[in-house]
Each structure stands twice: as structure tokens, then as C-alpha cells.
Amino acid sequence: MTLLSPAQADEGPRNPFLGLAAQALRNPSVLIGGFIVAAIVIMAAAAPLLGTVDPVRINPAIRLKPPSDLFWFGTDLFGRDIYSRVVYGARSSLMVGVSVAACAIVFGVAIGLVTGYFRRLDVVVMRVMDGLMAIPTFLLAIALVSLTRASVGTVVAALTIPEIPRVVRLVRSVVLTVREEAYVEAAISVGTPTPLILLRHILPSTIAPLLVLGTYVCAQAILVEAALSFLGTGLPPEIPSWGNMISEGRTFFQVMPRLVFLPSLFLALTVLGINLLGDGLRDTLDPRIAKRM
Amino acid sequence: MTAAPLANLPIVEIRDLAVPLPDGGDRRNAVDGVSFSVAEGEIVCVVGESGSGKSITAQAIMGLLPKIFVKPKGAILFEGEDLLKATPARMRSLRGSGIGMIFQEPMTALNPVHTVGAQIDEVLRAHLTLPAQERFARVVKAMEEVGLPDPERMYYSFPHQLSGGQRQRVLIAAALILQPRLLIADEPTTALDVTTQKQILQQIRDLQRSRGMGVLFITHDIGVVAEIADRVVVMKSGRMVETGSVERILTAPEADYTRMLIAAVPTLEAARPAGPVHGPLALSVKDIAKTYTIRSAFGGMREIAALKPTSLTLHRGETIGVIGESGSGKSTLARCITKLIEPSSGEATLTGDGAQKPFRRRMQIVFQDPFRSLNPRRTVGQSIIEGPMNFGTTKAEAWEKARELMALVGLDPAALNRYPHQFSGGQRQRISIARALAMEPEILVADEAVSALDVSVQAQVLKLIDDVQKRFNLAILFITHDLRVAAQICDRLLVMHRGELVEQGSVRAVFSAPSHDYTRRLLDSIPGRRAAA
């Protein structure tokens, strides 16, 4: 009788997914994107330790000051420290981006798993998803803000709802392929209950594509939040956010471009970092693209 | 079977070919020191199991090696010209006009969005400048030559409208339309049913005779070798084991490996005694049937009977073979019986003493593809203990049982915390069997359980199935398309054709006196039958 051949006996257990993670870390896009994202996250988390002052304290006596030792990036129209507002602005942007991605994924995965597995639900749920997808994000945000009032919750809800169908479609497509795999049939034949089959055998296959989609949703949400705030239908004006800063700085753009330029720079850098990370993850995690290299 | 032709000029001569593997492979060279030639008007078969380097050799000749392989060493002389030194442009013009190639998978080798005629025509457009009418005439003529019916109409057919055999004929027509001097056929009949395989082999033989071209035929099947080869090259792990005329290799092989390969091919002799098995009744299936209803967008309905009403009984200790070609309904039968799909009518009743046990504990199934039937993200231990734990066995107990079962199926119990990709195909199939046995079933359904394995591994897994049957007094429903395998392990046979049970009886009775016309055709199509007899 055969036992394991020596070549395989040396290896020990190896989770194929961990191998992919190690491979992802060698990808330059993942490294650069990951570095930028990590830097922004650290900046947001450690905001009070980075020499900032209260970003919302108004002091009309020092309006529109140029950069100095005291105010590194100068002050704005209301005498608030621009540096502190940029650093704290990372918090709002990241919070909106990550919350939208997380909410969209949680709802999308739950709906996608069930619709993909139970064919009868599929027809109904997917038509509802088509309907949701047809709602323009901006209109929905304006409607929600006018119905309730501007808050982080309203913005997150307005950005999440149109993203859910995208997640559902992705998860559903993975479920449709994986449910036909022989190992799912094998699990059915050893009597594994359906919820466990979904969680144990099907859900893990969705993780890699969801990671990639999650980065895009996050970057998209950060951009749209900035745009909404710029239009005045986003975060309430008292919250320091990059969108709000760009909006307020617009009137003095010609004389003091840095009012718009600095928050825009950080906004662009954050989105660039997240997109790089997402592209790199896609290249290493999506075997169809990875195999071509 | 035929006398080797006179020693003609070699069309292609391979001298000391070595294809290095990238670092980290299981050996230094994928192909190492291979030398042989193919002369005008002869068919040379390269035979070997998976990983023997036979396809790499063919790809090297075509200049189509995957990019991971660095420059091969040695020489490949095609009519005196070294192909390894040829420019990419020269290789492009040689492919098609000098060397034609056909592949294993006729389903994927054709582009689904172009008509088959246009795809044959593409070869002409790439190599010659001819007016459209003349090209059309040549394509039709080429399709006629490979025996495609009504070629002028079929020119405008799309691949999905053709059968597997017809698609392979289209590919042969495309490969041969420019009258190449050499045809390379890489497992061209492996994906086809036996009756179709027989026709395609005959076709290749006829075309080779009428054109006097050389054919390099790659296969894993000794039966096919006996059917078609003039000379044989046996390969193993990238090296040539031996070479010689087909008569000598088949009747007096020199190398142990060749002897093993030939011995591992199951014979058609029934291995089990003819009498009925007198175990208690385990399963009785009554008029089970499956019909699929297809609704079109315009409200029309079409019913497809995948399985017409079928009845059978199965006893403990007995193996019933269900044989048939693709689309015969044999897998549908297995899935209906194991309740993986809901039958449209009829029922399968488990009888016997285990009546208080849940259904899934009493009947288990082993699937065909050992690479897909285990979840790649879970260790084999997790896969084996999943079933018992679903029914309340504690983790410690299930794990202990898994260790015993690993030893039983011939694997190291310490390997339970490995992942499936760390095992070979045969080892994975052993794990699948261990997973099924962990449920302590009375009935085991094996759906093409050895079809994806090399013959030598196949023999071992068949022996394992035989052993566990004796040990646990299992009733086995063994589904296969391979009559030689069925002869080895079955007591009784059911022959299925187009969703219908056309014949049943003991292995001996079915093989020696087939009553249905389809069974006769099936038996007649087994490659190498005459040579083996």
C-alpha cells in the first residue's frame, strides 16, 4: 500500500489560502497601496497625538493666516487650523468608506448567498436588486438628507444602498459556480445542513473577490462622500471632512488655493492607495488574471 | 496489428530532447534525453501515464511549449530542419502547412462564436491567398474527407450544434486541410465515448494511409495503442522507457514499466464468479425516473427524459455495474438514488436491518473527479469527520475513526491535517472513499470513481474498493463508462442507453451473449480488444 511520497511528506500542512496571502504581499501594487493606506489609517487613528489642535474651534481673530510654526498649513475662513482639519478629516473619510464597504458586504453577502443557493428566490430578489441599482446615489442622498437631516448615518445609508446589488451579484455568481462543485455535493451526501454548507463550503470562496470589491466600494464611497459634502448634502458642516473643506474653501480658491488643494491632495492620495491595493489584490487573488502572467 | 511499413525517410526526428523544468519542480527535466523519429506513412504512439512528459514532447515539436519552460535542448529535425532553432515566423508557417495538430478536448478547442466552416477556413486564410469560392470548396472537401455529413450545410453550424465526435472531425479537417506531412494527435479520443472513439481512430488510420503522412499519436491507453500504432514509444517521468514495433512491445515488452502498464489494463474477463449474490436485500429501486422541463421565453415547454423509469435491486456484498456512454442517464440514476436530485417519479427504498439510521448514514457516494470532490480549503481530516459530526459523533471520536480509516485506505494517518492539493489523484480518491466509509454506510455508490485515474493507480483503487466491500459487506452501485473496469469488479451489469435500461444480467452473460444491439456495439468498440484477445 502506498503511503505519502517523501516529497510531500516534507511539506507539512499548508493552507492554500495562506500561500496566496504571502504571494499578495510580494506584489508591488499591494505593497505601495498598502503602505499609503496604512499611513492614512495611522494618521487618522493617532490624530490627537500629531500636534493637532481642536479642528472645530472657531477663532475669528486669526482668519485666513498663512502657514506658520503655530499653524503648519495656515488657518481657514473661520480661523480653524487647516492641518488639524486635514488630519481629522481622514477620520470622517475613512469611517464613511469603511462603513459603506462593510455594510454593503454584510448585506450583500447574506442576500447573495441565499439567492444564489435557492433558485426560486433568485428571480424575485434579483429584480429588486436591479431596482436598487437604478437609483442614482446623489438623488437618494439628497432625498434622505431632506427627509431626515444631514448625519454620518444618512450618508452611509445613501451610499450603501446602491452598492448592495453589486455585492449581491458578485456573491451570487460565485455561489452559482461553487454550488455545482463535487465537494458541495459530497457535503450534501454526508448530511451537512444547508446553512453550514453555505458558511463552510461556499462562503470561503467569496472572500478573495469580496476583498477586491470591498476596496473599490470603499474608494468610491470616499469620493462620493466628498462630492456630497461639497454639494452640501453630505456630512453636516461641523464635522471636519475633506469634502466640507473643499466646499468651504471654494470661495477663496483664487487667493488661497491651499484651502482646496490640501484636502484634495489627501483625498486623492487615499483613493489612490486603496485602488492600488485593490488592483494588486485582484492580480494575485484572481487566478484567471494571475495565470496569464 | 499491421506490419510496420518499410523504413521510409523520417519526417521528424527527435534527438536527445531535454526540456528543463523551472526550479522547484519534482524533477530537473520535464522531458529528458528523448530520441525517436516518425517516418512517412507510419503511426508512432507515445504512451505513458500522467506526468510522463508525452504532451510536453508534442508541444516542443509544435513550438508551443508553455512559457514556464526555458529553451529545450537537443534537436527536433523536421525534414532536416531543426525546429528548436527556427524563428517564430517560420514555426507559424510550418504549423498547419507542415505539421497539423489535434487536441484532447474538442469542446474547448473550437471557438463557440464562429461557425465551424469559418474556423477551418481560417487555416487557409492564414497560409494561402485564395479567392473565397475556392476556399469554400476546399473546406467542404476537407469536411467531406473526414466523414462529416452534409458538409455544405454543416459549414454554417456552430460548435455547440455538433456532437463530440463531429467536433473532433472538424478539428481533424482543420489540421489536415493543408496536407501536412506530420499529424500530431494529443489524446484525441480520450474525451469521447468508446463507440465514437472507434470511428475517430478508424478515420485517422484511413487518412494516414491515403495520404502517406506520419502520425505522432499520444495516448495513455494501451488499448488504443494496440488499435492504431505501428511503432510505440513508452515514456515515464520524462524519460523513454523503451521503443519498438507494436507487436514486440505488446507481446514481449522488455522494461518492467511497460509490462506493468500492459498488465494494469483490465481484461474483459469477468473477475467474479457468475452465481447470484445471496446477501440480504439492501436497496430496491422501483420505476425511478427524472424528467427535466425546459420552458422557453415564449411559453413553450419541452420535456427531456434524462432517465426513463428504471428498477433494480441490490444486495449486501453485491456490486452492480451501470454502464453506458455520456448522456445515457447513468449519473442521473446515481443522483436520484442518493437523493442528490429529486426523482420525477418512482422511489428508491433502503431495506435491511439499519432502518432506524438516517438515510445519509446508510448510503454514500464517491465521485469521479478526485480534484473537485474535496474542498480545497479544508484539511482532509476536516472533510472526513464532517459527516459523522453532522450526526452527533464527538470530534475526538470522529478524529479517531478518521485515523483508522486513513490507515485502512492505505494512507498515513499523520496526513489528516494536510490539504487536498498535497495529494495525488489516486490518494485523493482514497480519501474520498475514507470519507464515505466514515458514515459506516451499507450502500456505496461509486460514480465513475476510477475514471480519472491512470491505469496503474486505477487497479490499486479498484482493489481497495473490493477490499472494503468484503470487510464491511457493502452493497455497491458502480457507475462507469469503461467495460473493462466493470468486468473487474461487478457481479451484475445494467446497460443504459439514452436514459433507458436496455439490458441487464451477469457480467459473463452480458459480455458473452449481449442481447441488445447497443451492448454489442459497445463491446465491439473497446480499443485493442482483438489485440488483447
Image (cartoon, coloured by chain):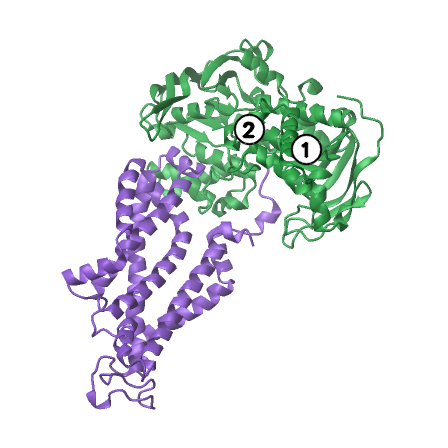
> Label 2 lies in what chain?
B
Q: Secondary structure at mark 1?
A: loop
> Image quadrant for the C terminus of chain B?
top right
Q: Position of residue B177 (x, y in %)?
A: 68, 33
Badge 2 or badge 1: first in the primary sequence = 2
Q: Residue at x 41, y 52 (%)?
A: A209
Front residue of this view, candidates B115 and B378: B115
Q: Position of residue B32 (x, y in %)?
A: 74, 46
Q: Is residue B224 left or right of residue A110?
A: right
Q: Position of residue B242 (x, y in %)?
A: 77, 35
Residue B462 seen: yes
Return the residue at label 2: B164
**Above or below A90: residue B518:** above
Chain painted in purple in the figure? A
Rendered hue of chain B is green
Q: Is residue A5 left or right of residue B240?
A: left
